[in-house]
Amino acid sequence: MEKIIKKFGFKDQLGYVFGDLAGSMINLYIDLYILTFSTYVLGINAKWMAGLFLFAKIWDAINDPLIGSLPDRIKIGKSGDKFKPYIKIAMLPLAVSALMCFADISSWSMTMKHVWIACGYLIYGMSYTGTSMPYGAMASVITRDPVERTKLSRARSLGGTLVGVLFLPLVPMFVWNKDQTANPQAFFILAIVACVSSIVFYLVLLTFTTERYSETDNKKHTANNYKFFDVLKEAARNRPLIGVMIASFGNCIASASMGSLSSFLYREYYHAPRMMALTSPLSIPILFFVFPLIPRLAHKFGKRNVIIASALYNIIFSSCLFLFPISNVYGYLVLSTLANIGQTGFMMLIWAFITDCIDYQEYKTNKRADGTLYSIYTFSKKIGTSITHSGSTYFLAAIGYVSGVATQQAGVGEGIRSMVTIMPAVAGVVEIIGMGLIFNLSKAKTEMIYAELAQRRNQGEGDKEK
C-alpha cells in the first residue's frame, strides 16, 4: 500500500535543484567543451568528432529505454525507493568520465587519442543515462500534485542555470591563455572540480528528496505484469509525448548553438574567446526576473501557451541577430543574452510536461511505467542531440574550420556567426510545431486527467481496505 511519509516541501525542491546541479556539472562541461578540448589541445579532426558524437548519441539513445526501464522491472536495495539506488550506482563512473574526457594525452599517438576520447565519451554517455533517467522519473513519485510538479520542474531548470552562472563562466577564463592558445592543465583541473562537486551534489539529492509513491504492491504495477514492448506500443500512441519529444528536438538545436558552437564564435569571429565568460553573469538579472514570473504565467495562461509564446519570442529575436550582424562583441553579448530568454522559459517548464505525459498514458491504459516513459522521452532527446551536435560539428568542418591551426581561412568566422544565430530561430519553429500543433493537452484537460487519476487511486485504496 502506498503510504505518504511526509509532506512535500522546500526540502524536496532544494534536493531536486542539487540533483540537476550534480548532473549538469558533468553534462554541461563535457558537452560544451569536449569539442574545443579535442580540436585545440589534442588536434583531433572536427569531422572525426562529428562521427563520434553521432555514434555515441545513437548508442546512448538505444540503451536509454533499456537502462531507464530497469527501475520499472527490477527493484534493488533495501530502502524501498524505486529510483535512488540506481543513481547511487551510476554517479561514480559519471564523475570518472569527466577526468577521462579532459586528460592531457596530447603526447600520445593519434590512434590512442581517438581510442581514449571515444572510450571516455561513451562511458560518460552511459553513466549519465544511469543517473539522469532515475533522477528525471523520480519527480512522478515525489509528488502527484500538478502545482508541486511545476515547482520541481522549475527547481530542475534552476540547477543547470546555476552551473551556467557559477561554474561555466570560469571555464573560458582559465582554459584560454592570453595569447588565445588553449591551456590543457586548466581543462583537467576544472574536470576535477566538476567530478567532486557532482558526487557531493548527488548525495544532497539522495538525502533531501523523498520518494512518496514508489511502493509497487498494487498488482497492476508489479514487475511481473510489466511488459516493456507493450509500454513502447502505448507510448507510440501517446500524442502529447510525441509533441513534447519534437519540441525538445528544437531545444536541442538551440542548445547546440548556445553551447559549444559559441566557443568557436567568440574565438573565430570576435577573436575574444574569454568574452564567453560574461554570457552567464549577464543572464543573472534575467534569471531573477524570469524565475518567479514563468510559473505565475503558466498558472494563469497554461504551460503550453507560455512555451509557444517563448518560442515566438526566440524566433523574432534570433532572426534579427542573423539578418543584422553585430560587429561589437559587447553588443552581441547583451543581445544574444536577451534572445535566449525564450529558451529559458522552455527549460523551466518542459519537465513538468513529461509527468503530464506519464499521467496521460496511465489515464489511457490504466498502467504506469514512469522510468520507461521518461527514458523514451530522453531517447528522443538524445537522438535530437546526436543529430544537432554531430550535424553542427560537421557543418563547422564544411565551412572550412581546421583543427589546430592558429588562424582560420577567410570566411570561417562569418560562417560560424551565421550558423550560431540562425539555429535558435529554427529551434523556435520546431518547438511551435511540437507544442502548438501536436501536443493536445489543454490546461482544462490536464486538470481533468489529474482528477480522474486521483479518483481511481482513492477507489483502489478503498477496495484494498475492504
Image (cartoon, rainbow, N blue to C red):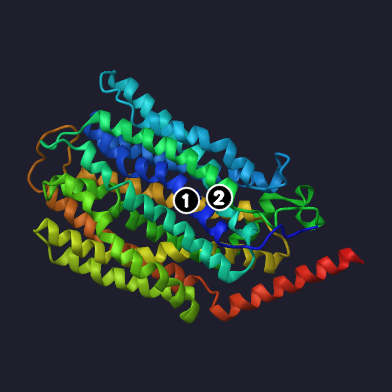
Q: Residue at coordinates 79% horizontally, 47% vertically from top-left?
A: 224
Q: Is residue 110 visible?
A: yes
Q: Compare residues 158 and 438 and report the one nearer the observer.
A: 158
Q: Residues within 10 Å of mark 2 (few under 14, many from 20)?
A: many
Q: Compare residues 57 and 218 and report the one nearer the observer.
A: 218
Name above or below for residue 42 compared with residue 364.
above
Q: How many marks?
A: 2
Residue underneath mark 2: 135
Name above or below for residue 317 compared with residue 129.
below
Q: Describe the element under mark 2 as helix, strand or loop.
A: helix
Percent coordinates x, y for residue 61 in the rendering: 50, 45
Percent coordinates x, y for residue 159 in the rendering: 43, 54
Q: Residue at coordinates 17% horizontally, 45% vertically from top-left?
A: 273
**Label pair 1/2, CB-CB below 8 angstroms:** yes
Q: Is residue 59 visible?
A: no
Q: Residue at coordinates 68% horizontally, 59% vertically from top-left?
A: 6
For badge 1, the amino acid type reads: Asp
Q: Residue at coordinates 36% horizontally, 29% vertically from top-left?
A: 117
Q: For the view shown, which residue lies furthest in the right direction?
A: 466
Q: Compare residues 403 and 168 and report the one nearer the observer.
A: 168
Residue underneath mark 1: 20
Percent coordinates x, y for residue 9 in the rendering: 59, 62
